[in-house]
Amino acid sequence: MTCQRLDGKALALQVREEIARRTEALKARGVTPGLAVILVGDDPASEIYVRNKGIACEKAGMRSVTVRLPAGTTQEELRARIEALNADPDIDGILVQLPLPAPLDERQALNAILPEKDVDGFHLLNAGRLLTGESAVVPCTPKGVMRLIRETGLDLSGREAVVVGRSNIVGKPMALLLMQSGCTVTVCHSKTRDLAAHTRRADVLVAAVGRPGIIRGDMVKPGAVVIDVGINRVDGKVVGDVAWDEVSSVAGWVTPVPGGVGPMTIAMLLENTVEIAERRA
Ligand code: NDP
């Protein structure tokens, strides 16, 4: 079986066209979807992410607000800014760009966002709703990964899925979504013994670690769907967690980095914003 490249860039473009249409329909009803992004400090990578989110928002016809706060912002000041956005009727989605500079407490900040405006789905209530299978704002990256997997046409029921990484923003929600889709899910992490023994069983393998090339060709089941969430900078180049050359000669489908999960994450952010705005309308 020849390996197919799962093109997140092309799929994200399709999704964004659909979102632009939904935005137009909302505007015709007098509602312009609005996304506010709070950036604390001057982390260069966060700067780029926030700028890209703002551009994507405006391209889709949405209102985009960026709140820039200095690195010395206190927890109380941050909370006050979040609460002002909670109360702003023109803002549908609020996102706090992570990581926050020390000593700010991310959990406190995320839980200060009104759950209905929690466009990243990181508030405890949305995390709990996802766990119990109730309707929830689903975190953008895992949601985007599910869309990519669906593109393969693979019936997920009864499949073995392995997620490498157990963070609250990627690994854990990813595992829940795969489980809800009928997969038997294994979650691996830094304490996992013999990672390869797990990954080799995977029909669907999601790598969300942040270590370049940790997934090698001999760790992948022939024909598997391999999703590379990792973003690593090596010698000025962005690479994923998957050793592309090796894995693409074994897998059935692989996402590239860049051009795989990243563009889908932004597309899902816009989708979540428009969904919240539709509820408002
Ligand atoms: P975290 O650092 O929060 O989590 C990394 C996870 O990898 C942890 O659960 C850790 O285990 C696990 N891990 C570390 N080393 C190993 C190892 N040797 N073997 C197995 N597991 C290991 O990262 P995130 O979840 O936030 O992000 C993961 C990657 O995805 C990063 O590269 C990040 O940049 C990228 N990312 C990409 C996005 C996109 O849109 N494409 C969006 C979000 C993130 P433990 O819990 O035991 O420490």
Image (cartoon, grey):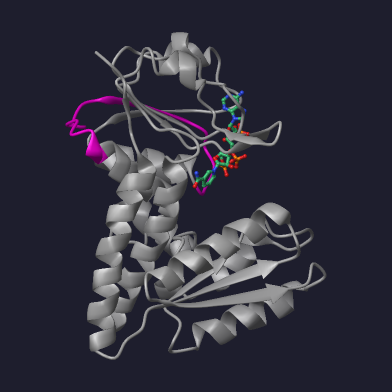
Residue at 39% across, 64% down? 270
Q: In what quadrant of the picture does the C terminus appear?
A: bottom left
Q: In what quadrant of the picture does the N terminus appear?
A: top left
Residue 203 in magenta? Answer: no
Q: Nearer the viewer, residue 56 or 280?
A: 56
Query: Would residue 78 be found to the left or right of residue 174 on screen?
Result: right
User: Predominant secondary structure in magenta?
Assistant: loop
Above/below status of 192 relative to 64: above
Q: Quadrant of residue 46?
A: bottom right
Residue 34 screen position, x and y as percent: 43, 79
Q: Nearer the viewer, residue 95 or 19?
A: 19
Residue 206 screen position, x and y as percent: 42, 31
Residue at 71% across, 31% down? 235
Query: Would residue 152 be found to the left or right of residue 73 on screen?
Result: left
Residue at 38% across, 46% down? 9
Residue at 61% across, 71% down? 38
Above/below status of 221 relative to 28: above
Residue 13 screen position, x and y as percent: 33, 54
| Picture mark count | 0
Residue 258 screen position, x and y as percent: 50, 39
* Segment colored magenta: 150-169
Residue 164 in magenta? Answer: yes
Residue 61 visible in rendering? yes
- Ligand 1, image quadrant it occupies: top right
Above/below status of 229 relative to 99: above
Query: Would residue 159 be found to the left or right of residue 64 on screen?
Result: left
Query: Would residue 87 be found to the left or right of residue 251 on screen?
Result: right
Residue sitting at the far top: 218
